[in-house]
Image (cartoon, helix red, strand yellow):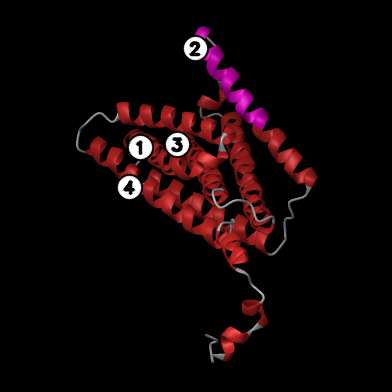
Amino acid sequence: MNSSNPFFKNKNFTNTSKADVLDNADVMTISGTINKSLILLGLLALAFAVTWYMTFQGYNPMVLTIGGAISGFVLVLITSFKPEYSRQLAPGYAICEGLFLGGISAIFELTSYAGIAMQAVSATMVTFVVCFMLYKYEIIKVTEKFKSVVISATIAIAAFYIISWLLSMFTSYQPVQYGNSWMSIGISVFVIIIASLNLFLDFDQIEKGALNRNPKYMEWFSAMGLIITLVWLYVEFLRLLSKLSRD
């Protein structure tokens, strides 16, 4: 039976086959990625509250905190090689990172000063909004050169942290980034800048993924990538604020 509603007589409806509808429902969209990101943030916040509450109730949250960090890292490794599993693994990653962040945030709150966690959250959100607006209005464009510079800097930071950690484990070397010297603070500022620039890569990945009609599971994969960057940025803000609070 034909509908008498002129809206359904539009050629965009009449020329769309059943196969097209099924295909359109199974591809990545920007709105779908935003929804997935909000779900992951919600799970992270709930898990965050668990270890935060435990700490201030006098319980030792280290098992959940360290376990969350290790488990989250493992899930990231698996997802990076198997993006098709991101639908199942991304929520688990968000929960693990929430446990980790809640624990270390409570520790910083007790050892540095009250309110440091909220300041780090605020700084992270402000940075996210600023970067999003700069990307949206194309004030900063994600070119291939931009990508290569940011990715190279990110890899260099990761290598620097790993080498410093290994040296401190097996030698008497004291990593300069652990102190509160001007050099240490400068390193933290530089790392925050690079972490912020990674947000542009995340935005670009989401937009390009939707334009390329990537599979639906890439919404979870892209959302997970965005959460990874936000977690990194938040931790670096915590560290910087802690350094600035020291005498």
Secondary structure, mark 4, is: helix
In front: label 2 or label 1: 1
Q: CA distance from mark 1 to mark 4?
A: 9 Å
Q: Amino acid at mark 2?
A: Met
Residue located 56% across and 57% down the image: 26
Q: Amino acid at mark 1?
A: Leu
Residue tagged 2: 169
Above or below residue 18? Residue 110 is above
Above or below residue 180? Residue 170 is above
Q: CA distance from mark 2 to mark 4?
A: 33 Å
Q: Amino acid at mark 3?
A: Ser
Whether pointer 2 and pointer 3 mark residues with C-beta atoms closer than 8 Å, the reply is: no
Residue 174 in sight in this render: no
Q: CA distance from mark 4 to mark 3?
A: 24 Å
User: Start and end of the magenta stretch?
Assistant: 155-171
Secondary structure, mark 1, is: helix
Nearest the eye: 106 or 18: 18
Tell me the quarter of the picture where residue 80 sits.
top right
Q: CA distance from mark 3 to mark 1?
A: 20 Å
Q: Amino acid at mark 4?
A: Leu
Specify which label sits upstream in the sequence, 2 or 1. Answer: 1
> Residue 181: where, in percent of width, then height?
55, 29
Residue 227 located within the stretch drawn in magenta: no
Residue tagged 4: 46
Residue tagged 3: 242
> Residue 100: where, in percent of width, then height?
38, 35
Q: Residues within 10 Å of mark 3 (few under 14, many from 20)?
A: many
Main secondary structure type of the part rendered in magenta: helix
Q: Residues within 10 Å of mark 2 (few under 14, many from 20)?
A: few
Q: Tell me the tag on residue 99.
A: 1
